[in-house]
Image (cartoon, helix red, strand yellow):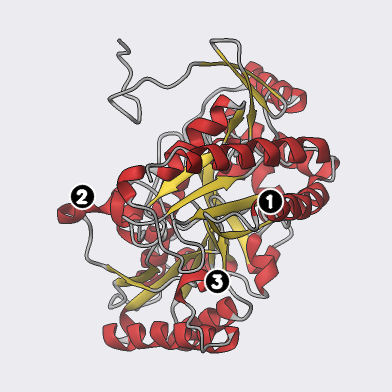
Amino acid sequence: MSHLVHRSLRSTPPLAVAGKGIYLYDAEGREVIDGSGGAAVACLGHAHPKVLAAMQAQMEKLCYAHTAFFSCESAERLADIMVGHAPGGLTHAYFCSSGSEGNEAALKMARQYFLEIGQPQRTRFIARRQSYHGNTLGALAAGGNAMRRKPYLPILSDAFSHVSPCYAYRDRRDDESDEQYVARLAAELEAEFQRLGPDTVIAFIAETVVGATLGCVAALPGYFKAVREICDRHGALLILDEVMSGVGRCGTLHAWEQEGIAPDIQVVAKGLGGGYQPIGGILVSGRVIEGLAAGSGAFMHGHTYQAHPVACAAAVAVQEVIREENLLENVRRMGKRLEERLTERLGNHRHVGDIRGRGLFWAVELVRDRAGKEAFDPALKVNERVKREAYARGLACYPMGGTIDGRRGDHVILAPPYIVTAAQIDTIVERFGAAVEAACAGLPA
């Protein structure tokens, strides 16, 4: 019996004992392709020598120094890398230990900004249904993952309300063009501002490409431009959560670069450190920092392990490898190949409703009836069946249920490391396709 609390208390997962490149190895000696990078985390794969060397060098110099007393070289260097060129007006960085912590920091900084500039009446956030921003209470309240929220609803803040996601596969009407659908969503957001009182809204928060809860859903063209315009008109901030989709995962360093807008605060995590150390954070626009600096002169928030020297050193090395090895180009090329191979292999499968994504961030939505987009009975746990069949074939993927409303719907994510090759993409798709077929063939009539 394991004394460790696992995600499931009814079963013990396989024991991972080693990792190299895009492969993981379990205690049974099985070689498994890390086809989803864990949860879209392992962007460089495992045991990259430059990252390991950077961590070792940092540990030999300095393992920890509390940020109430000191800064450290690796944190300063990481900030220079991420915002030293002020992308989209983002000029400052704050580093913590996870995406959940990053979203908490974003929410608190946004609220404090309006206190500092004399708008204390701003107490509300607008987010989206079928979103996910983390498991801490503030981030969970912001998120729209109904399944994860349900047990904790009585202790979640009521400062958050939710509007529809941009989920064209299911929510765009047959008689609507893309432009009309975007206009309808923009009108819904505008109506929520008006319902709350425009001068009470702190920010609109959204995932640039929706991750685990909805399954790699990118917005239609023009959506985020409309959102940015609404926030600007009402003086609210725009917070973009790129914990999963950012730092190269979608083919550009920031996913918002492909939307023609920039946020006021961006949340980053998984691709920042690639899983080599726990790290997340926020990238912040100059005007927000200026507001705090001109007021109290401090960010009233902090963590024991913020800007951790070893975590920041690992992240610096990860970002340097991405640049030195031109991995964003590989993400774009291999992402195109992944899309093409998935479409060839599963595009006409009777139980595959949608194949969607960007870069090396793709999901397949599984349905009982392709024509009517009817979801499987949630009790069948089809996404978990695919996960098991894939693992049996030497592939790790990322399954999720509740795609549609927190209860109904199944999707599975593929998000291989940025170092993946064309031959490895082909192997991933072949194993995944076989897993989908086996999982669906094993369903009750």
Is residue 214 depicted above or below 74 in this figure? below
Disc 3 marks a residue whose amino acid type is Arg
**The residue positioned farthest toward the left in the image shown:** 154
Q: Earlier in the sequence, mark 3 or mark 1?
A: 3
Distance in Å between CA atoms under marks 2 and 3: 35 Å
Mark 1 crowd level (few <14, some 14–19, many ≥20, 10 Å Cα) = many
Q: Nearer the viewer, residue 345 or 171?
A: 345
Q: Which mark is residue 88?
A: none
Distance in Å between CA atoms under marks 3 and 1: 43 Å
- Mark in front: 3 vs 1: 1
Q: Nearer the viewer, residue 293 or 358?
A: 358
- Mark in front: 2 vs 3: 2
Residue 18 position, x and y percent, is 61, 16
Quadrant of the rendered image containing residue 224: bottom right
Mark 2 crowd level (few <14, some 14–19, many ≥20, 10 Å Cα) = few
Disc 2 marks a residue whose amino acid type is Tyr
Residue 397 position, x and y percent, is 56, 38
Dot 2 falls on a residue whose secondary structure is: helix
Q: Nearer the viewer, residue 225 or 290?
A: 225
Is residue 197 depicted above or below 407 in this figure? below
Mark 3 crowd level (few <14, some 14–19, many ≥20, 10 Å Cα) = some
User: Can you identify the residue that label 2 sits on?
Assistant: 152
Say whether marks 3 and 1 touch (CB < 8 Å).
no
Q: In this view of the protein, can residue 97 be seen by the observer?
A: no
User: Can you identify the residue that label 3 sits on?
Assistant: 287
User: Can you identify the residue that label 1 sits on?
Assistant: 342
Disc 1 marks a residue whose amino acid type is Leu
Say whether marks 1 and 2 touch (CB < 8 Å).
no
